[in-house]
Every structure is written in structure tokens, then in C-alpha cells.
Image (cartoon, coloured by chain):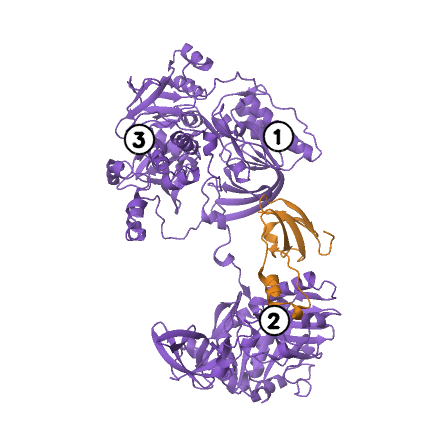
Chain colours: A orange, B purple
Amino acid sequence: MLLMPCPWCGPRDEPEFQFGGEPATRPIPAAEVSDQRWADYLYLRTNEKGFHRELWCHAGGCGQWFLVERDTVTHVIHRTLKPGEPA
Amino acid sequence: MKRLPTGGRIDRAAPRAFTWDGKALGGFKGDTLASALLANGIRIIGRSFKYHRPRGLYGAWSEEPNAIVDLAWKGEHDPNARSTLVDLQAGMAASGLNAWPSVAHDVYGLIDRFHRFIPAGFYYKTFKSPRWETFEGRIRQMAGLGTLRRSDDRRRYETRHAETDVLVVGAGPAGLAAARAAHAAGLRVILADDRAAWGGSLLWREGVIDDRAAADWVADTIAGLDGATLLPRTTVFGAYDHNAFGLLERRPSAADGWATERVWQVRARHVVLATGAIERPLVFPGNDRPGVMSAAAVLQYLREYGVLAGNRVVLVTNNDSAYETAHALIAAGARITIADARPELGAIARRAADHGIQVRANTVPVNTGGRHGLRWVDVAPRDNLAARERIPADVVAISGGWSPAVHLHSQAGGKLRWDAAEAAFLPEAARPGQHLAGAITGGTSLAEALEAGHHAGTVVASTFGRASAVLPPRAEPAAAPSPIAPLWFVPVPDQRQWIDFQNDVTLKDVALAARENYASVEHLKRYTTLGMANDQGKTSNVNGLAALAAFTGREIPEVGTTTFRPPFVPVSLGALAGMRHGRLYAPIRHLPSHADHLGNGAEMREYGGWLRPACYLRVGETVPQAIQREAASARQAAGLLDGSSLGKIEVQGADAAAFLNLLYYNELATLKPGRLRYCLLLRETGVVYDDGVVARLAPDRFLLSPSSSHTAGVLAMLRAWHQTEYPAMQVAFHDITAAWATYAISGPNARAILGRLATSIDISDAALPHMAIADGSIGGVPGRIARVSFTGERSYELSVPASHGAALWRHLLDLGARDGITLFGIEALSVLRAEKGFILIGTDTDGMTLPVDLGVTAPLRNKKVDFVGKRSLLTPDATRPDRRQFVGLLPADPRFVPAVGSHAIETADGKRRSIGWITTSCRSPALGRSIALGMIEAGRARIGETVELFHLGQTSRATITAPCHLDPAGERLHD
């Protein structure tokens, strides 16, 4: 059970959070995007072993989405970022 | 075996009567079930899993591999009680398992005669043709342990959550010293120990700490931990990420109605693992005979419970620790012979010899004998195994060294290293936030354990910038012990030597596995089931992999260990569930008028997490009859429906309209204040996620009505898109579902009934046309009326604050009485909406349904903004001409209602193929016949065609129609 620092609320237990997967940038304007590019945005994720960037939502708390940089092998959480915070 | 008149922690003034296999026995308060059985001379307590060999006590605590029993007490039942972990209580009824008629006389014991023919893997190799499943049932009947009773577990279990500065696991000398130091530094401490009494090894090993008897030091230390959370009888069974721990607290003496077990979920800034070590058995021929016991366990039974396990004891060891047992047994009046496998007698052995104990160096056991228990043991020089000598014995106390209890360290991701000098796997290094003290780090003296524990406590304190206010506890330094001489097995051919007692894994099985190239320790485990019994290999693990190393010509570190996984001891499902079962598993939501529904005869059922009326039964009516009557009344006169569970999400802000227009499929920018629009909400994949009516209350204020079961999901979706894609937009969301009670009056008399309602809202058709909404007062309280219809009839939806809901419900019933108002439930609503061809999300749609499949195509053509899911509606798959489309179906036989899930079949080239299926079907009271809805390939182009339906071998026919079966022009909305 991970202990994850919500950028607004501080460290909280994993069950308070909702996993949002790897961030994917929405291609815009969507109407001009190829089918392939759109399918990649919808479905293609790198799923790296080790260092990983993920979106999580503190759904059971403040309800805010944020970015997590963590290691999927050691489970070390390097840092969490508010949206728009310089990476 | 006998109970001594003095000694131990038991209270001889408090006898505890219990039964074993129906026979009345007695023990004392402070006994475990195991110690009481031993005191009563019960030698055979179990039968082994595979060969049905008689088994007695080997250990005294959680390492015990044999003594699992069926236990009943106070109306409760545990089919697999571990007798060494059970606090004896008066009235307990225990009996043996895996045997018939009893463990002492088990007819299945005959199986053991054929052991040569049933080696490891025998069952899987033999019973594979035609299928393992053909034989599985019979084989499992002969194996296995306890039998469940078919009754509910009425015990109460609870879950607790805690957060602490430091969790100390184990209250032996190291753990107590650590807790004491951390507590003295002002830290929040949780101290957990799986024993009922504090002290760990100090409960059965002698020592002097700070010039006091160890027991007094333990009592003083515990008394000094003022304000700390002290958890005796609590096993830390699992270590999880970031210092999260699972603890099982047993509370056998809890008063009636209180929890007998609690699972604690603890998050600790730091953890001190002072978990000690487990004594390993020696592997030699006949080592599973009842009476062969751990030397440490023999000492524990003696010192803790005043039970002398045997009068004639042969003590076999390869290390120094067993000598304390020898001295204690002699003091208690037993006769002792010591066989020490080491070639030379060390200092401690010579001292024993000086005390007159017969000590033989370089000596190992080669066989044991005795029916229903031990009578003799053969020993021989280690370098001349043929020179056997028989020694009479009723107990053989064995010590093969100590395996540190590294389980929690390893579960937390800690690595292990093989220490040849200790002949043990030790933690390589502590994990972050983890501190190790005492025997978990290898053999330590009492003085060293105290020092390491104190050190761990002060290190933890220093990370908080604190210093400990106590001096370290002191004990006499001990002389270094003579080194252990590994003795992994005795090379005697043809006789079975047990490694895993419970699962009957012998040395030969390991040899067979090695011969068949199961050379990885993980493969060995699965092939032989070594370590897979409910003791999880606590005593067998290291002996098994040492044997594998020998048979594969490798060193132990090359073989490695299997992965340690939680739980350390079995944890019942009841304890893990805690209170989360039955009605508390997923608490159901109730409507504001719940009591009125019950009074009105409602049949309540769960819909989307809410308990709602399915229908209202009248005397003598069946549920299907009630549904038909209610649906007919709503079309003929008026119906009243409780719609309070329908979602209500308020959306406010300067950008509310623009934001919702980006989210919803339908155009919302053009929606005028005071008006409603039916809208679909898509996922980015284009799939329809939800539908509902969107109301614009004001230019910057909207009210969404998602499906009851999707309200939380829609709110989460709005938030996610706002925060991650459109953060600059000025918009906020709020779920107000529970704040409002909402009732719908539907039918030709609805307008007349509402005309009698005291309200400030103008309900004339000019002021409140179909798909309009208005605020005002209703019966003196603030409310809202919306013209929206889920039935196809003229309908009004009235909302008032939830606390006024029940009163309004009764008032509407009164007002409508003379116009034939009828209560209708969810089932009648489903019939009414099916007649109209209105979809029900998740029933008529699935994870592939696009809005175009439902025939809703205008927004895709006309709406300019890049709404969620739009691009996905333009892909080749989304524009395929043969997509399944939403249609109506009229069965050829108007009395036949085809089952939901019936497939429409097309036959081409002699092959049948499904072209879609029925999603909704019912009898329509308005049409007096059966109707259906479904998803059919290119269904709109097939309207008028007849298709064949197929369901569970039955075929029928139906004609494809438009979805709307009744009043396609919608004239009834305005009647």
C-alpha cells in the first residue's frame, strides 16, 4: 500500500487515490489528426519498467488530479507535481 | 509427559476443563491448547497430509507444523485451529483432523505402507488421463485438513487503522529495549507481540537484566511504556509498501458481542523488526515420530507451562543453544543423554559433562522407533553410521540451529545473504525506515540483543531530532558460543527423513526433484509442495534448500530462497473482511420517502446502489401483475414515481456553458435558460457513457441529471476534464443528489392533479411547455418543477429539499386520489420507457455503442466544437455500414416475450450467424402484446424484415421496427 504525497493534502494512503494511467497529450485540433495518431493517443502507452510518470487523482480527498513520478520496481515515489508545475 | 507441581506462567488455581476427541481433560488458565494436550499425555495430535503418518507436537508456537485441530467453543468453530496458538478456555472441544475414525487409530494410515509408490508429483504424473479433474475430487477427499461447518461465522471482526512514529515487532529483549528507548524519547510507539505474555525468549530463557530477574525487568519495562499502544497476542503478518503493516490481534477473552479478532492497518514512520529466530529441526531417519520435538519447544513447555515432555530425553544438537534445555530437564528430574554432532566438545558441552550429563561428541541419530510414539533412538558416530547404538527415549529433543525470522524484512523487499558461520540466511541490509535488532540479525547474546534494541530505538529517535532519556539496559556479556556444525541430513539410504512434516516432503522427494531437474528452489517448492502447508515452511525451508544444494552440487547461496509473502500466519477471511460484510459490505442508499414506500406496499429492490420500489403490491397480486397494472394506469390516468435517486449535479461558472458544450455530445451553447435538453455523454473513445437531461437554470448555471448509478462517475469525468484539459475555464461542480427529493407525476391527468397544488410556479403550457423548468415555492418550501417525461406521457417532475420529500409524497397522493393516481415503481417505468423506445444506459447499450448506433446523428453533423469523443466517431470502424443499430422488435407471437440476450440469427451458406441481440423485452399493456428492443447489424435498413431469434435452443421470429412502439409523434406529451 503506497504512501503518496498529494500536492495539496500531503501524504495519504493509496486507497484514497484513483489511478489515471500514463498521461497522454490530446492531439488538437482533433479533426485534423490521422486515425493512427488518434488511436495512439487513446490506446498506446509505453508502460515503462522503472521510472514512470502517472496521473493520479486524490478522489477520496481533495478531488485533484496530479502528476506522480515514481519507480514501478522499487515503488519509490520521486515526487508529485501539481498540474502546470514546471517538471 | 507430566505436569510439574510448580513452575510456569499457568495459574494452577484456575483449572480449565476441555475435551480431546470426546475425552474429558483438564488444563489451567495460561495454557495453550497444545501445552494442555502435552500435559495430559496426548502424543498423537494430527495426521500428516499425504501419508497419514501420526504426528505430535514439534514446536510450541507459530512454527508448529503438525498440531492443527478441529476446535469448537461457545457455539463457534474453527476447522483448522493451530493448537499452539490457542489460549485454552473452559469448554473447548478439540479433535484431530485428516483421520478416520481418529488420529490415534486412522485407517487411512495404511496409505503410508505404499509410500514407495507415491513420491513427489505422483498424483500429477498418474492421474492425468483422461483429465486430472476426473480424479481430483476423490484424491482431495483423502487429503486436506479441516471441514467447514455449513453455518455462518457469528464472530465479530473489526478493522483498525493507525499511524505511528515507530512500530516495534516483537517484545523480546531487543524489541522491549527498542520500545523503551523510543518511548523515553517521546515518540509514539506501537509494540506488538504474538504471545499472550511479554518477554519473547525471556519467557523461557533465564537471564538477569539491570540486576533484576529478566521477568521483573520485562514487567517494569512494560509498566514504563505509559501511553504507548501495547498489542499482545498480535501477529504482524504482513509488511507492505512504504512501511505499511498488517497486524492480526487475537482477543479470545473479548466479552460477548465484541470483536474476537482485529486486523490493524498500521502505517509506521519507522519499524523495528525484533522478530527473533525459529529453531530448525534436524533431518534424520524417523525424525517425524511423535516425541521428536524442538529442543527450544521442550524448554518452553517446561518453563512456561510446567510440562515435562519426557522422562528419558535424548537431546540431539549441532549447536550450543540446546544445552540450556538439558540443564533445565535435569533440574526437573528427567534423564538426559546428549548427542552432539560436532566432532569436538566445546566449552558449554564440557561444562555439561562436568555436571554429570552424558555428552557424546561426533554423534548423530540414525533411526527412531516405537509404535504410537517414541521408544528408542539409534545413534552412531558421524563418520561410522553403521556402528549404531540404541538408547531408550520417550522424547528426542532436536536442534539444527536457528533460522532468523526474516519474513517481514523480506516481504518489504529486503535481500538476504547466506552466513556460513551462522548457517543461516540473514538480512543483507535494513530497508528504508526499517531497523533490525536481536536474533533476526543472527545469533546474539542477551547483552547484545538489549544493546541492539536500545540502539535501534535511539536511532529512530534521532531521526525525529530527539534523544532517548534512558540508559541502555545491561546484562552480563556471554562467552562466544562454539560454532554450529551444519548437519543438513544423515546419509542413510532407504529410510525416510522428513523435511516438511505437514506436507510429507522427505529427503528422497528433494532428491527426486533434483534428479528430474527441478533445480530452482521455486520449482522444488511447487513440485514437492515443500513449505506450502499452513506453517509456510517455517521449519522446513532452509533444510529443504540445503538438501537441494547438496543434490545439485551447489552451495546454499547459489540455490537461494523462495520469496517470502504475507501472511506470516494464516489470517481468517472473517478477520480480513472485518465489518465489511452483509449489509455493511456496500451500504445501500435509502430514499427520503423510504418509510412511505414500505407503508404503500412497495417491493424494494436495489437499483444502482439505491433501494427503490420495484412495484407496489396490492392484496392478492403477483409482481408481474402489479407491474402491468401500474404501467397501464400511468397511461390511462396518472402515475406517481419516486425519482429522488436520479443524479443531480450543479455546474456553475462563467464558462459553464462552454465547458459542458465541450463535454456533451449534444449542442448545449444554444440551450436557453429555463429549458431542458436530453443529451448523451461520450467517452473519448466515442462510446456512450451516460445519458440524461441537462437543464439550464441561468446563463451561468446548469443542472445535470445523470443515471443514478453514474452520478459519481459523471462528476469524476467532469472534474478530470476540467483539471487536466481545460483548467483555465471558470466552472465548478457539485453533487446535490441527496439534497433534493424528486417525484414525477405522469399521465393524462397529471396536469389536473398539479392544478390543485399550492405553488408559486406557473404550470400553464405557455409558461411551462415540454422540456422547460421553473423555480418557485411548492407547498411553502423552495422547489422546482420540470416538464420532462420518461414515460412518453405528459409529465411533471417536482423537486423539494429532501427533508420535505416525504410530506410532498403524501400530499401528491392525496391530491391525485380522485383522478386515479397510481404509484408506480422502477419495473413499470421500464415497461413504459420500452414502449417508447427510450434507451436504458448499460441495458440497451454496452461498451461498444456509439451515438450513431442509437440513431442520434445530428450533433456529429452540426456541432462545430471538438467535444469529447468526436474524433472517435469519424474512424473507419465508427462509420462501418454494418454496425449494430438500435431497433424495435415485434415478436411474431404477441404472447411470447423473447428473453433478453436472445440472438437474431442469419443463415448464409448453411451457416448460422448472430447479427445482434435483444436488449429489452416485456409485455406492453398499452399495446396488449409483447415488445422488444435490440441491437441489430444495419438494423435501420432492415426495418420491416423478419428475423429468426435463437435462445437456449429455442427459436422464434420477430419483425424489426423503429424503436418507438407507441405514439411515435409524441402527441401524448401534450395531451
Dot 1 alpha-carbon crowd within 10 angstroms: few under 14, some 14 to 19, many 20 or more: many
Q: Earlier in the sequence, mark 3 or mark 2?
A: 3
Relative height, residue B973 to residue A60 (above, below): below
Residue ID at (36%, 79%): B956
Q: Quadrant of the C terminus of chain B?
A: bottom right
Q: CA distance from mark 1 to mark 3?
A: 45 Å
Disc 2 chain ID: B
Residue designated by label 1: B456
Could you say where residue B125 lies in the image, as x and y percent from the top left?
Answer: 30, 45
Task: Tell me the element at label 1.
Answer: helix
User: Badge 3 sits on which subunit?
Assistant: B
Residue B256 vs residue B264, the one in the foreground: B264
The mark lying in front, picked from 1 and 3, is 3
User: Are tags 3 and 2 found on a single chain?
Assistant: yes
Please, what secondary structure does the residue beneath circle 2 have?
strand
User: Residue B533, position in %: x, y?
Assistant: 39, 40
| B447 horizontally vs B537: left or right | right
- Residues at marks 1 and 3 touching, judged by CB atoms closer than 8 Å: no
Identify the subunit bearing mark 1.
B
Residues beneath discs 1 and 2 located on the same chain: yes
Query: In terms of sequence position, does the residue under pointer 1 or pointer 2 come before the other?
Result: 1
The residue that mark 2 highlights is B681
Q: What amino acid does circle 3 point to?
A: Arg
